[in-house]
Amino acid sequence: MNFEPERLQIRVYGDAALPTLIYLPGLHGDWTLVTSFRAALANRVRFVEVTYPRSLTWSLEDYTNATAAALLAQGIDRGWLLGESWGSQVGWALLGRSIKATDRPLDQQEIGFQTEGLILAGGFVKHPWKWGPGMLKWIGEHTPKKSYELELKIYARYASFRHRHAPETLASMEEFVARRTDLDRQAMRQRLDLLEQYDPRPTARQTRLPVHYLAGLVDPLVPWFLVRWWLRRNCPGYRGGKTFWLADHNVLATAPARASDWVLKWMQGATGQA
C-alpha cells in the first residue's frame, strides 16, 4: 500500500445536495475503522473521510489548516464535524474559527470552512485525566516493536469477533494493521504531545452551535461521563448525547447502525439525551 506520510488526504462519498458530515479520526489517524459507520449513512449524507499525515512536526493548527484547505479544495465550505477521540481536538479548533467569524463582518475568503455542528464520538474537550495522554505515550514508548506487532495480531483476531456485525469494518482490518508502521507509531505519540499544548475549553464555553456526544459504555481511554458532565455545565451549545451499552471507545465501529441513526437525527435538528 502506498501511504503519503506528509499529506492530509480526504475521500468524499455521496451527493453534494445531501447534508455534509466530516469524519475526523482518532489517534490512529485514518479512515480504516469507520467503514461500517459510513455504509450505514449511505445515501443519507455526503460523508467526508480524513486521513492525517504521519508528521512528527505538525501542530494542531497545521492539522486544522490542512483539513480546512482540503475541504475547500473539494468545494466543501460548510458541514457537521464528527470528531472521534483525538480528532475531537481538530473539531474544536475548526468550530472555534466559525465562532470567531461572527465577531466581525468577514468576506467568504476569510471565513473559509463553516462548522454547522460538532459531534464527539468518544471525544473530549480538555482530557479529564491530566495524566492520561502522558501515560498512553509512555506505554507506547516502552512497548518493543515485537510486542507491538503481537498486540496488532491479537487485536486483528479480536476484531473478527468484535466487528462480526460490521462487515465493512472487518474487511478494512488488513489495511488498519498494514498502516501501523514505526513512523505511524511515532506520529501517534506526537499527536499525544499536542494534547498538552491545546485547550479547547474557552471555545466550548463560547459556542452556541449544536454539540452532541456519542459514547460506548466500555471506554478505558476517555471517561465519557466526566466529559458529558462538563459539557452540560459549561457548553451553551451542548444538546445531549447517547451512550451505547454494548459498544466501546470506538463507538462508530462497534455500534455503527445505531450511532448513524442518532447522528442523522442530530444533523436534522433533533435534540435529546440518554
Image (cartoon, rainbow, N blue to C red):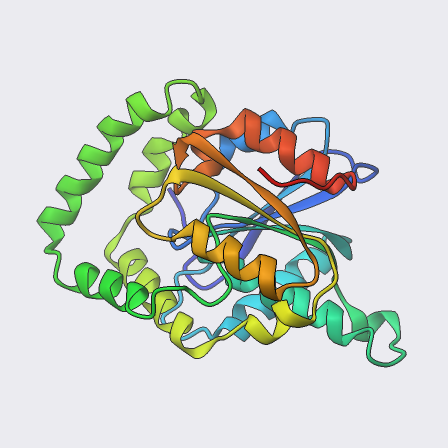
Taking the image as drawn, is residue 32 in sight? no
Looking at the image, which is closer to me, 34 or 70?
A: 34
Horizontal side of residue 166 vs 40, given as left or right: left
Quadrant location of the C terminus in the rendered image: top right
Horizontal side of residue 254 vs 228, given as left or right: left
- Farthest residue, direction bottom: 104
Taking the image as drawn, is residue 196 in sight? yes
**How many numbered badges does the structure rendering display?**
0
Could you say which quadrant of the image residue 259 lies in?
A: top right
Horizontal side of residue 196 vs 108, given as left or right: left
What residue is at 59 percent from the left and 26 percent from the top?
Answer: 40
Spot occupied by residue 260 in the image (x, y as percentages of width and height): 60, 32
Spot occupied by residue 223 in the image (x, y as percentages of width and height): 38, 53
What residue is at 30 percent from the left and 28 percent from the top?
Answer: 159
Looking at the image, which is closer to me, 140 or 132?
A: 132
Spot occupied by residue 128 in the image (x, y as percentages of width and height): 40, 64
Residue 59 lies, with reference to residue 9, above or below; the image says below
What residue is at 65 percent from the left and 59 percent from the top?
Answer: 70
